[in-house]
Image (cartoon, rainbow, N blue to C red):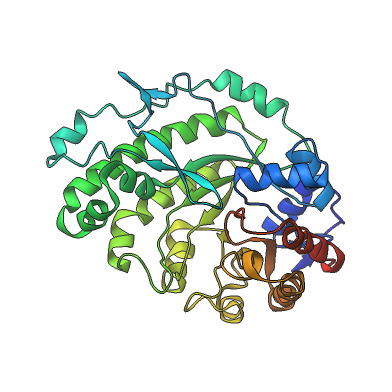
């Protein structure tokens, strides 16, 4: 990679790594539940996330999207814009909003989908968004836009039925995903125009992998997901916006398609304990084309390891990714079971040893 002038801000580090250049040090990012963030701020004496990022030397992105003018589905003040209702479920170590209904579950015909009250890109406040962008911290990169339609389809349809639809009801699944795509594409067009020149990265995702293999076949992925992902990525690139791509799990076999069809630049979260996701092989096969984001194991090392285990993994990652571009981050949201000491150790270690 080429050398560039030494960046001094998080935004410049992100810009350098997207440009294939070497920043002054390995960039860092932060993913965590709200409970973890609140705990860290309290225990580390930080008043807000910006102070937390500064204290731990985190190059975290700032996510800003056009606010909804109405956050609810027509006629149902208890449901979100998609008609989904949620309930808080406590799992002991933390609580999550889980879906309490599946509004498309009863449908059997495409015509029923056409009559459904899909959200509109008109129902957002772009003037307020421009103001939010204008007042965002200038030293941080802004992330705007989100496209993960099959995750949403699973919520609307029910997970089991949604997975079966790809094989048994392809016309229905395709029609529903197209309704979602039209909304997200128009929303992204208007978002990128309103935030022209200030948005650095957009988020495109689909959880394509499980713990040991893909969740669906490659032909299904190529049929239902990749064409619209490409359109969303092409739209972002036309505005000079970089593509941050997220997929969990064992996804080695689909990475070539994500590169060649979707056109991803960054792959998150690198769950390297999954089969096929061995870090050395990923660097060997894709290190010249991909930014690797994550790779700090959030299933074993961070929640259940010692601080020494965390430090060892940071240094191990630094060595493995030395010939590629790597953003040091947990490989998904930090959970309440992960100790503050382990989290601080991760960021302090990469700060001390991350110079390039």
Q: Is residue 289 above or below residue 196?
A: below
What residue appears at the point 84 percent right and 48 percent down from the top-left corner? 55
Residue 95: image location, x then y, percent: 51, 45
What residue appears at the point 14 percent right and 34 percent down from the top-left corner? 111
In the displayed structure image, the side of residue 166 where residue 188 appears, left or right: right
Q: Quadrant of the C terminus?
A: bottom right
Residue 188: image location, x then y, percent: 48, 35
Q: Is residue 288 above or below residue 12?
A: below
Residue 268: image location, x then y, percent: 56, 60
What residue appears at the point 26 percent right and 44 percent down from the top-left corner? 157
Is residue 296 among the parts visible in the rendering? no
Q: Is residue 279 above or below residue 92?
A: below
Is residue 62 among the parts visible in the rendering? yes
In the displayed structure image, the side of residue 4 where residue 61 appears, left or right: left
The residue closer to the viewer here, 258 or 28, is 28
Residue 155: image location, x then y, percent: 33, 44
In the displayed structure image, the side of residue 269 where residue 112 appears, left or right: left
Q: Quadrant of the N terminus?
A: bottom right
Q: Is residue 217 above or below residue 143?
A: below
Task: Give the tally of numbered discs.
Answer: 0
């Amino acid at each position: 990679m080429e050398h560039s002038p030494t960046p001094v801000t998080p935004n410049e580090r992100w810009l350098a790594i997207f440009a294939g250049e070497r920043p002054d040090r390995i960039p860092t990012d932060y993913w965590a539940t709200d409970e973890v963030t609140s705990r860290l701020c309290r225990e580390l004496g930080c008043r807000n996330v910006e102070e937390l990022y500064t204290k731990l030397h985190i190059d975290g992105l700032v996510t800003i999207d056009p606010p909804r003018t109405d956050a609810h589905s027509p006629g149902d003040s208890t449901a979100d814009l998609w008609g989904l209702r949620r309930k808080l479920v406590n799992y002991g170590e933390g609580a999550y909003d889980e879906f309490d209904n599946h509004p498309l579950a009863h449908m059997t015909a495409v015509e029923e989908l056409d009559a459904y009250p899909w959200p509109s890109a008109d129902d957002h406040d772009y003037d307020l968004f421009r103001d939010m962008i204008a007042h965002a911290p200038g030293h941080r990169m802004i992330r705007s836009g989100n496209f993960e339609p099959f995750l949403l389809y699973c919520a609307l349809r029910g997970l089991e039925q949604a997975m079966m639809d790809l094989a048994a009801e392809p016309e229905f699944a395709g029609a529903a995903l197209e309704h979602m795509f039209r909304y997200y594409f128009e929303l992204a067009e208007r978002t990128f125009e309103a935030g022209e020149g200030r948005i650095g990265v957009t988020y495109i995702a689909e959880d394509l992998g499980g713990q040991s293999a893909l969740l669906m076949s490659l032909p299904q992925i190529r049929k239902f997901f990749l064409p619209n992902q490409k359109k969303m990525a092409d739209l972002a690139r036309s505005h000079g916006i970089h593509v941050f791509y997220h997929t969990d799990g064992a996804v080695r076999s689909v990475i070539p398609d994500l590169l060649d069809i979707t056109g991803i630049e960054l792959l998150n979260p690198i769950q390297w304990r999954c089969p096929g996701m061995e870090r050395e092989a990923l660097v060997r096969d894709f290190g010249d084309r991909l930014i690797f984001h994550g790779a700090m194991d959030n299933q074993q090392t961070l929640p259940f390891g010692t601080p020494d285990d965390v430090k060892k993994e940071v240094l191990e990652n630094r060595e493995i990714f030395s010939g590629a571009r790597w953003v040091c981050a947990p490989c998904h949201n930090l959970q309440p079971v992960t100790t503050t000491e382990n989290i601080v150790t991760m960021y302090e270690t990469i700060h001390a040893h991350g110079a390039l």
